[in-house]
Image (cartoon, coloured by chain):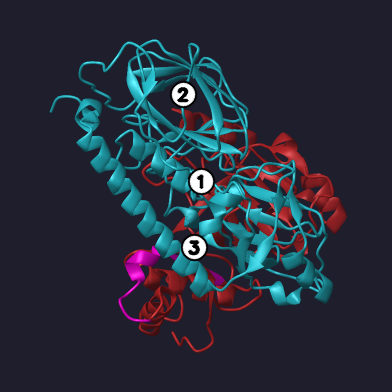
Amino acid sequence: MSVNVLKPGLLDTLQDRGRPGHAAIGVGRAGAMDLPAWRLANALVGNRGDEAALECTLLGPTLRFEHATWIAITGAPIAARVEGTDLPTWAACWLPAGSVLQLGRMAAGCRSYLAVRGGFDVAPVLGSRSSDLHARLGRALQGGDTLPLGNTATDAAPSDHPHALPWRLDPQPWFDFAQAPLMLLPGSHGEQLDEASRQALYTRTFRVGNDSNRTASRLDGTHLQLRAPLELISEASLPGTMQLPPSGQPIVLMAEAPVTGGYPRIGQLAAVDLPHLAQRRPGDPVCFRRGTLEQAADRLRRRGQALDALCRQIERRLQHDGFLSRMTGPA
Amino acid sequence: MPTGAIQFEPLAEDALLLRFGDRIEPMLNDRVHAAVAALRELPSLECVPAYASVLLRFEPAAWQGDDATSAHQRVEEAARIALETAHASAGTGRIHEIPVCYGGSQGPDLHALAQHLGLSDEAVVARHAGADYRVAMLGFAPGFPYLLGLDPALAMPRRPDPRTRVPAGSVAIGGMQTGIYPTELPGGWHLIGRTPLRLFDANASEPSLLAAGDRVRFRAIDAEEFADLDAAQRR
């Protein structure tokens, strides 16, 4: 069971939940930039664990599926086509053997997820199949790559033609079409910003910089300044941490955040808003609103509950429709 | 160890920073390693040591109770209890001898660094290989050790023009610190030598040769021994 990469997209990497537990030896977590979208893509094809899915960036790849299987695409809305048939996103889709899936441009957002029944089955490194470009574990897909798939034993093919199940998920609230302000918590050195910068951080509109990547989103616009330079020693750093390098352009660390850093930390993005920032492409606006750790923790808890509930609902629906058994194949 | 002087700072929904101080100082770093040894006994916590701090990352749901006590409060309480019964200083850690071929093509910056410091090449090597180091923390890249213990006479500001590719195994000086590039990386430190040892292998049962808290000594080797050890590592 495998998938061939006929033409790579702009940046395609395999991602799962990530690689926790190794920061002490200098290895960060990596993992999907938009974890809820990654998880829902897996749920839609009946995957229940930490299967690796493909994270595409702005422009998707062209892939050939050697065997029939179920796929689902979530995250940023992306054009998906199989031999003249347009496939919906946020829905389970059946692909017959030999299908060539063309993923095009994203109409909005920055990252789409392609999950395949059984997951992409590359060898895990330190317990995860996530590529970490910053740490040089794994790499982006290249033309000619063959990706093995996990056990996708599927009973009689539902059809010889690609088609989607008749129901799909509402991308909202998982995809933030409105590009709402993001909640920013106080950072260790936020009080050291000068008065104008403290104001600007919560009132101005920043733009995602062109040099943003899986390690950091760089924010163009107003330059921020500290009241006086700070001499800091390196401490552990995290995804979501807003740092202020000497250039005065704030950056927000993302999934491939370095495990340590010595720049001033002027804020911490609420974890629930991290996927929303991950979906802002270069040039997109970013505004911040103040929040507290308690509010952020509460939002995170509620989002976790909503996501769990939706995944259970998807599973019941697949079961009820009789697709889960077909997806799973004979026992 | 007494916990009164430790600052507990919530950094994120799943992260609590324990700060022992704000300087790069062997005594503070020693407390970090002692703390990590005790904190590692707690379940469901990831400990990330740095020069003078330890980051605890946790699964908020696993630490959240039914009452109003937050996950951060619970983690802080568990950490305080673990630390109060811990020793004030860490054990010696493992001791590693790292063979280094100094100068020449393996250490292209040795001569310029020696000249800048007003020392002979041999004196730099003798001082660098004559000191005891401690791995203060790992960071920057997988398996990259920040070592404490550099002879102050060898301190030199970083290069104004960082290299885009520093070969794996390069031993380097940057400011008051010395370190070893575990893999080919960009870097702005001065390259004074190179070790044939492999510092990081993601597929090994213990991926990083060095851990925070370990001790390191360097041993000067010649090009021939470098070639032999390098060949032995490849087998």
Question: Dot 2: what SS?
Answer: loop
Instruction: Give the Cα separation between the discs numbered 3 and 2.
Output: 44 Å
Q: Amino acid at mark 1?
A: Asp
- Tell me, yes or no, whether dots 3 and 2 are on the same chain: no
Q: Amino acid at mark 3?
A: Val
Question: Dot 3: what SS?
Answer: strand
Magenta stretch: residue A220 in it?
A: no
Q: Please give the range of residues in magenta.
A: B53-68
Nearer the camera: disc 1 or disc 3? 1
To which chain does the residue with label 1 belong? A
To which chain does the residue with label 3 belong? B
Chain coloured red here:
B
Q: Amino acid at mark 2?
A: Leu
User: Residue at 80% of width from left, 58% of height from top?
Assistant: B157
- Tell me, yes or no, whether dots 1 and 3 are on the same chain: no
Instruction: Give the Cα separation between the discs numbered 1 and 3.
Output: 24 Å
Above or below, comparing residue B162 to residue A79 in the picture:
below
The disc, 1 or 2, on the residue closer to the chain's N-terminal end is: 1
Nearer the camera: disc 3 or disc 2? 2
Residue A47 appears left or right of A293 = left
Nearer the camera: disc 1 or disc 2? 2
The picture's colour for chain A is cyan
Report the residue marked by disc 1. Answer: A34
Residue A120 appears left or right of A34 = left
Report the residue marked by disc 2. Answer: A87
To which chain does the residue with label 2 belong? A
Report the residue marked by disc 3. Answer: B48
Badge 2: residue crowd in 10 Å (few <14, some 14–19, many ≥20): many
User: Residue at 50% of width from left, 49% of height from top?
Assistant: A27
Quadrant for residue A71, please give it.
top left
